[in-house]
Image: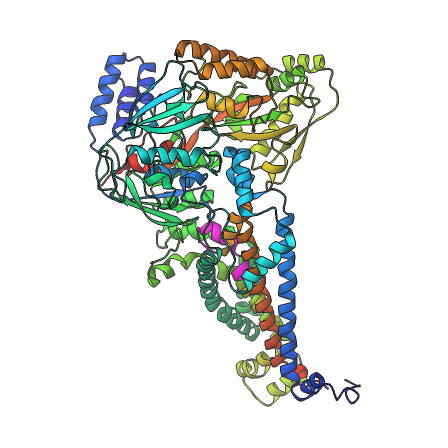
Amino acid sequence: MTDFTRYLAGRVTAGGMSRREFMGRAMAAGMTLAAASHLFATSASAQEPRKGGHFKLGLEGGAATDSIDPAKATSQVMFMAVRTWGDTLVETHPETRAPIPSLAESWSPSPDATVWTFKIRKGVQFHDGKEMTTDDVVATLKRHSDSKTESGAAGVLKSIKNIENKGGDLVVTLDSGNADLPAIFTDYHLVIQPNGGIDNPTAGIGTGAYKVTTFEPGVRMTFEKNPNDWRSDRGFVQTVEVINMNDATARIAALSSGQVHFINRVDPKTVSLLKRAPNVELLTTSGGGHYVFIMHCDKAPFDNNDLRLALKYAIDREELVTRILGGYGKVGNDFPINDTYALFPEGIEQRKYDPDKAAFHYKKSGHSGSILLRTSEVAFPGAVDASVLFQQSAKKAGITLEIKREPGDGYWSNVWNVQPFSASYWGSRATQDQFYSGAYLSTADWNDTKFKNEKFDKLLIAARGELDEAKRKDMYREMAMMVRDEGGTILPMFNDFVNAATKKVKGYVSDIGNDMSNGYVATRVWLDA
Amino acid sequence: MSNSTETDSLPGQRFRERFPLLALVIERMLLSILLLFAVSVLIFGGVEALPGDFATTYLGQSATPQAVANIRSELGLDRPIVTRYFEWLGGAVQGDFGTSWASRNSVSEQVGKRLGNSLFLAGFAAVIAVPLAVGLGMLSVHFRNRMPDKIINVISLAAISLPEFFIGYLLILYFAVNFGVATFPATVYDGMDFLDRIKAIALPTATLVLVVLAHMMRMTRAAILSVMSSAYMETAELKGLSAWRAIARHAAPNALAPIINVVALNLAYLVVGVVVVEVVFVYPGMGQYMVDAVTVRDMPVVQACGLIFAAVYIFLNMLADILAIIANPRLRHPR
């Protein structure tokens, strides 16, 4: 064993590394797959999860306006809370993001993927002691998908035609084929509630590892272990406390003084300082969230593809990842999908900063004069700095960007999706289909680049109903190329999720699904004595 | 009041002649109520005029036109603004601020809790800061232009010159992180016992005291000094009163009006202006509640907070004015 692999094994024992991460690094260091796999297993089993303890989290993203109704859960804190007290039908694998059973034991589609049958797990109790039934599941899905719903999941459930209980199985009929239905059911809004939560949406009663004990919106939330949890591989700590901390410095102070065990949203600018604290460990996970500059393809001068290409070549992606993300991210390739998605199209050539090519396309476009870019600190952290860096790199290609700093308040109503060229961000979605359907389909509400391409739309619909994964992957490749070469998105970087915890926290799983171990952090970790 | 004989028949005028002080006070109170109504119109109108809209802001990227339309119709945003204003005002007068659009909880209940927290912190800071500031002001008059005066001045000026969040961070760094003697974060919640609460708010209280100290202290010092230069103080000194006694018995009461005013201003600040301190210390007060609501355009909450802030401000100023009227002999006995 080399020193490096011994170091890696030590990290596994310390609970700081997932299997995927470990295998990747060990094999890169020259170990064979079998040897690495064996080493991981022995190091990981050296520690048994310890039960008990009070796990405290200091999180950004909660507000006094938060609601415990999962249909209205939008903030980071409520996302994590819902994952803590509730279960969805389907979960995603932390390393591959493939759908895996949760409250649904198994599922099967009809050959055209329009009718799906889900077997619902038996013997699962809600926190109030009632047994969960298929009727509860049906009621939940109906509440989120009927025409009067205010649910955040309404968009992804739009294509559902009928939901019914057929002999104890859940049968969902769609108006067109969708191979991704199980992945859609991993959406955190869709936790199963007694009678769908229709009687009391804010009861906070589910089937999750923890029961809600107190909830003060924007202040604090506490949980205690659900003694009747149907799963034994989670829920190790006895009680959980979430404190809303919207100030980045306050979170870091609370973590480094040991008052909380876990914080989210570590500012990349202060990461290097936090790393020096002896008791703190950084937990980073790559994700599908990304920062963008969006151009409206239907408005001058951005209706000219050469101008769009010129701007895509005129941005220095490596520099932005280093300077804006502090290195905690990956360069983007002008399409919104990266390797955290299933069926990611590999091997597409990486677009690089190239002032010559930018100048060439700029000349070809025939545009002259400056181009107005609207930006704001709320577009994404560091958006104003990123815009200035973009201005500098574009200048070398002979393109003049004029930067207008917009007020953060009202940015999402007045600038984003309204003005032709602005800074913005996107969070990750469960599947490629969901992302493209939400932001690149001609008719999508949030098609913020006004990208309208008939061929793309057809491919998207065809791929959605395609159950053959190889064929589907090829389709997604073709779509990615279209967005990359003709779309209005300049996508310089994907941001990592940067969390931090004290060294007492063990068993953290770097889940590529979403931030904070896909929201499951409290149910997955344990506290060392 | 040269025409007082002509208007003798008016009952208001007669009342004014017989109880000049009471009339002044009542007049001041009525003015405050009028002002509060004017402010309520401004708040309602201003909040309505804010750009952006609740439904789209709240749902963010997960909004669909269907969901947005559902929320709008449920909240009745299509009704005329004047109707909604009077409905809101009618409720507010009875202490009912409606329901939060975002969480669907009663605003009054939430505001009650948050206002309680804010007043607890502000009250605690005031109990320490006001006597300290006035005492230090008198002390620095006593030792004016000598070493203690200079030290008090330099320290309090330094404290007021640092931004409040910076003072907060310094206190957190030293007392919570480095020495680990203070509690951080300062989150208080239902069912927390009194001693724990006091411990939790120790650092934010210290921050607030440092922020408001200099202003009140220097005003006390200046007001007393200006009285000190008057003739009767010279008399007091000549008749052999000790300096300390002269300050406490003769100078301080006459310097009261400006001191009361600056104290009231600072008390108002402690209640309505401490959002930055709340954020830094993770303290669940009114300021943070309002900021959360503004970001998602939760209008009932914004309006309720705005109105309460205005009421606190107007009330404290009114109180200061009334006290100043009572303390000022010239206003008490108008010629």
Corner quadrant of residue A418: top right
* Residue displayed at 54% across by 53% down: B300
Q: Is residue A420 left or right of residue A330?
A: right
Frontmost residue, B74 versus A442: B74
Q: Is residue A235 left or right of residue A264?
A: left
* Residue displayed at 44% across by 37% down: A265
Does residue A445 belong to the magenta stretch? no
Residue B221 can be seen in this image: no
Does residue B271 belong to the magenta stretch? yes
Frontmost residue, A433 versus B120: A433
Q: Position of residue B117 (x, y in %)?
A: 44, 59
The span picked out in magenta is B270-285
Q: Is residue A373 above or below residue A468?
A: below
Q: In the rendered image, which quarter contains the C terminus of chain B?
A: bottom right
Q: Is residue A160 left or right of residue B302?
A: left
Q: Is residue A236 above or below residue B254?
A: above
